[in-house]
Image: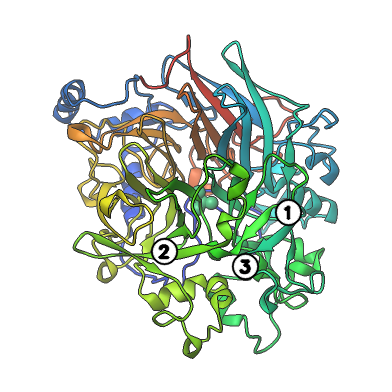
Amino acid sequence: MTEHRSPDTKFRTSLLEENEGPATNPTDNRTMGEIIAARFSRRGFLKGSLAVSAIAATVSPLALVAADDARAADGSVFKFDELEAGIDDKHHVAPGYDADVLLRWGDPLFADSPEFDPTKQSAAAQARQFGYNNDYVGYIPIDGSAEHGLLVVNHEYTNSHLMFPGIVKVVDKDGKKALETAPLSKDQVDVEMAAHGGTIIEIRKVSGKWQVVRDGKLNRRITATTEMQLSGPVAGHDRVKTNADPAGTKVFGTINNCAGGVTPWGTYVMSEENIHGYFSGELPEGHKEAANYKRLGIPEGAYEWAAHYDRFDLAKEPNEPNRFGWIVEVDVDDPTSAPKKRTAMGRFKHEGAESIVAKDGRVAFYLGDDERFDYVYKFVTTGTFNPNDLAANRDLLDAGTLHVAKFDDDGTVDWLPIVFGQGPLTAENGFAGQADVLIETRRAADLLGATKMDRPEDIQPNAVNGKVYVMLTNNTKRKAEQVNAANPRADNAFGHIIEIAEDGGDFAGTKGKWEVLLKCGDPSVAEVGATFSTATTANGWFGMPDNCAVDSAGRLWVATDGQGPKATGRTDGLWAVDTEGAARATSKLFFRVPIGAEMCGPLFAPDDQTAFVAVQHPGDGGEDWAPFGRPSYYEDLSTRWPDFKPDMPVRPAVVAITKQGGGKIAV
Ligand code: FEO
Ligand code: CA
Ligand code: CA
């Protein structure tokens, strides 16, 4: 998610995720972003695909010849003709592929769902329709099929200025045009709450094209008001008790569900990420949660929910934020089941929860905490996975050991257990038990001396090559004196990717080796220090890795968040990244999003014949998208993707990419 808005506007722009970390260090030095912006403006930006030519011209002709030669010989495992990078109002996929819109915001999900009408939105309608800002996409086969299954999709957040008419108004301010925003009505807040959460929807491939099954028995919407259970060590603790839930076991809703995962036993896990934005108000003077909330940036007050619901107001319900920031597990086989917030997996700004079964049957979940200078985690279940009785795995996530990563400069990674009573996690430091440790996971990790990272996002174990890939989006706040081997660039505007090999191939273990797979950014600008292979073309490099996927052949695909005219001269998209042999660190562009969007998903069907991608917050973005964009809002959108109808707003959507004529992707 890239959410950031100042308190006096409803614009949640989508450039760089600007969550204020606790260790922000303003500097007078010229930032890498400024260097790049100056470079692009010197060249004079051209519209659309012409922009690509402007970038390509910065790579020496010799380098391009060398690139083409190397590509033919370097043994890349990806076979497709690369797409041209650029910026316009549409999506684009590599030649020879179809990219079909499968599910748009507002699409009906049930036989009785109303058709989408943006002028007649209601919470009741939205709760029966596809939600906003699709992020994580997972696929759970039905009867083992790669062409019939449940698609599970997170709806991370809402952009009210893109969703609702009449929110943004053009006014005259001292003789100049300015934009003002109106407060949301309670009905609009209710629509926002119903547009959050997740969707579980049956889909089927018919004659090579995916279709939604509207009367699927397992179809379900989960929202910010769905009743769920707190489970694990924090359930029933005093710090999660509220007026509405004096027992501390029942929570209404999940919010800001970013990436996620599907467990080996076929449940859907949703990560609660930027929870701070939903809370407003002030804690009572001297309240015991003050330091806890400060470490998470609570309250930010980006949403107006507290104006209508007391539970989002810290003054009225001071414990409510402790009930968010968890991993939520959903039993997709029972649409009436209460999702469970699995507190053993820690509380922070959870990005994703991808998992793998270790040699001894325990299951490891890799977890990122998406904030500048925050941490990489791994949760290892106490129990072992039972492949013969999936129901026997029902509560595996309630008991296990959460670890945090310490990346040493010598290339080892130590997974430090976050366990009450061990090391500094004691009463002297204010922890009375494991529940306290989990509620304040970040503080526990601080005390353990974990390595402060450049915004850990999606982390993907690869069952084919045994490695684990860690996406680190960027961190322009890192100063030269804060550089370490695992975060090697000061003013890291473009992010990097770390590859971990657990010792002995044991995903449940506590030691491994790591190396940097890739430092991102434009490799033709020496100051950037990017490390793409020389075979990578002017279209093939990217910045800001965020989500990722590994296909069944073990090939890595990286989705980005935060590119644009000023940052990289291209929209976000999906890149294929070689990890093995001479082609290692070669990257090729496969799909790109329309203006203003971020690339989420991605996910490959089990037969590798479909790539599902989620186009999040298309048409968002403000001045930074000039000259291509402008402040974009319902009445004056930078794109009306994907419908391109004058009476339809821009709509986040999931896209299914297939090869024309069938077959595996990029083979
Ligand atoms: Fe929601 Fe970290 O992206
Ligand atoms: Ca993101
Ligand atoms: Ca993300």
Give SS at disc 2: loop
Q: Helix, strand, or loop for circle 1? A: loop
Q: CA distance from mark 3 to mark 1?
A: 18 Å
The residue positioned 76% from the left and 48% from the top of the image is 194
Q: Residue at x 28, y 26 (%)?
A: 77
Q: Quadrant of residue 220?
A: top right
To which residue does mark 1 refer? 224
Label 3 element class: loop
In the picture, the disc for residue 647 is none
How far from the left and from the top, in percent, is residue 241? 73, 74
Q: Is residue 55 left or right of residue 176?
A: left
Q: Quickly name the residue at label 2.
A: 375
In the image, 241 versus 293, the foreground residue is 241
Q: Residue at the spot x=62%, y=28% of the render?
A: 142
Identify the residue shown where x is 70% and y is 34%. 649
**Callout 2: 10 Å neighbours few (<14), some, many (20+)?**
many
For the image shown, how many numbered marks are present on the structure? 3
Nearer to me, 461 or 321: 461
Among the two numbered marks 3 and 1 on one chain, the one whose residue lies closer to the N terminus: 1
Q: Position of residue 240 (x, y in %)?
A: 69, 73
- Other-residue count near label 1 (Cα within 10 Å), few / some / many at <14 / 14–19 / ≥20: some
Using the rendered image of the protein, determine whether residue 26 is visible from the camera's viewpoint. Answer: yes
Q: Amino acid at mark 2?
A: Tyr
The answer to whether one can see residue 641 in this image is no
Q: Amino acid at mark 1?
A: Ala
Which residue lies under the disc numbered 3? 300
- Real-space Cα separation, disc 2 to disc 1, in angstroms: 26 Å
Question: Is ligand 1 within 8 Å of the beta carbon of the residue shown at mark 3?
Answer: no
